[in-house]
Image: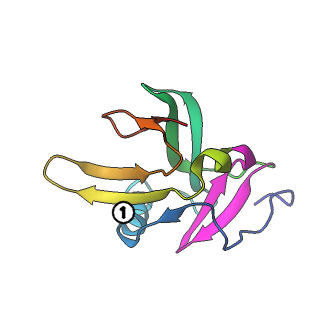
Amino acid sequence: MSADVQTATSTSPITITPSALVQLKELRAELKVDQDHFLRIGVRGGGCSGFEYQLGFDLPEEDDKLYQIGDETVLMKPGHALYLIGMEIDWATGLNNRGFTFNNPNATETCGCGTSFSA
């Protein structure tokens, strides 16, 4: 990790459920993600409703905020917390829906895909 990247803190603007943490650990092993890559959570413009969630493994960048959630170190750009504060990431295993879900109290509108929102 670069000397310019801060140490992970325990106060995170988001939560990740235990079932989602298990799936992230399995995904990390399945994809053979290097230990120097951490979980990046963020938003970007696009999607049906205006913003899309970002969720993936990435190297830390100089301006990232780091948070420790369970066994995962989470990377987030400082400006993204505004859209994500209070959000919960869960793992759904229903017949019609399997995958990560984003329960975001800041979303004023979401689309059917579950990965796009407006705030």
Occupied quadrant, residue 67: bottom right
Q: Is residue 11 magenta?
A: no
Residue at image coords 74%, 49%: 78
Occupied quadrant, residue 37: bottom right
Q: On the rendered structure, is 27 left or right of 53?
A: left
* Viewer-closest of 52 and 64: 52
> Badge 1, how many Cα within 10 Å: few under 14, some, many 20+?
some
Q: Is residue 75 magenta?
A: yes
Q: Inspect the image, locate mark 1, and give the three-letter code of the amino acid beneath it.
A: Gln
Residue 85 in the image: state x and y as whole percent: 60, 55
Residue 96 in the image: state x and y as whole percent: 16, 46
Work out which residue is located at the far right of the displayed protein and give it.
4
Q: On the rendered structure, is 23 left or right of 77?
A: left
Chosen colour scheme: rainbow
Residue at image coords 67%, 71%: 11
The residue indicated by pointer 1 is 23
Quarter occupied by the N terminus? bottom right
Residue 113 in the image: state x and y as whole percent: 32, 35
Residue at image coords 58%, 33%: 44
In the image, residue 52 above or below residue 8: above
Residue at image coords 44%, 57%: 89
Quarter occupied by the C terminus? top right
Q: Secondary structure at mark 1?
A: helix
In the image, residue 10 above or below residue 84: below
Total of numbered circles in the picture? Answer: 1
Q: Magenta segment, which residues? A: 63-79
Work out which residue is located at the far left of the displayed protein and give it.
95
